[in-house]
Image: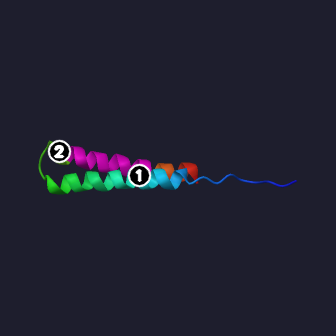
Amino acid sequence: MERTAAVSDKGIGLGLLFGLVAIGGALVALVLPGGPASAWGFAAAMVAGMLSVFAIQAYL
């Protein structure tokens, strides 16, 4: 009996997408220091980074 596994690139794609969102949020936090926009940028970077790791682990 042969066993096969379906391999998907969805985890890599989602990981890259959330990684780019995390970089964007970090840039917002860097460019606009000391304000609500900086806080939201940092929060977006942290959440997107977490989702990036989760997407890669969930689909691989």
Position of the C terminus by quadrant: bottom right
Report the span colored magenta.
39-52
Q: Which sits in the foreground, 6 or 55?
A: 6
Q: Residues within 10 Å of mark 2 (few under 14, many from 20)?
A: some
Q: Name which residue type carries label 1.
A: Leu
Instruction: Report, in whole angstroms, how far the alpha carbon at label 2 lies from the one at label 1.
Output: 21 Å
Which colour scheme appears in the figure?
rainbow
Return the mark for residue 39. Answer: none
Look at the magenta stretch and give its main secondary structure: helix
Image position of 10 (left or right of 5): left
Query: Measuring 50% from the left and 56% from the top, which residue is drawn there?
Result: 12
Residue 51: in magenta span: yes
Secondary structure of the residue carrying tag 2 is helix
Secondary structure of the residue carrying tag 1 is helix
According to the picture, the residue beneath numbered tag 2 turns out to be: 37
Q: Is residue 19 above or below residue 36?
A: below
According to the picture, the residue beneath numbered tag 1 turns out to be: 17
Q: Which sits in the foreground, 25 or 13?
A: 13
Residue 7 percent across, percent down from the top left: 64, 54
Query: Measuring 41% from the left and 52% from the top, which residue is drawn there?
Result: 17
Residue 35: in magenta span: no
Residue 19 percent across, percent down from the top left: 38, 55
Q: Which sits in the foreground, 19 or 42?
A: 19
Query: Measuring 30% from the left and 46% from the top, which residue is drawn there?
Result: 44
Count of labels in the image: 2
Q: Extreme left residue here?
A: 34
Q: Name which residue type carries label 2.
A: Ala
N-terminal of the two: label 2 or label 1?
Answer: 1
Residue 10 percent across, percent down from the top left: 54, 50
Residue 47 percent across, percent down from the top left: 35, 46
Q: Residues within 10 Å of mark 1 (few under 14, many from 20)?
A: some
Image position of 56 (left or right of 33): right
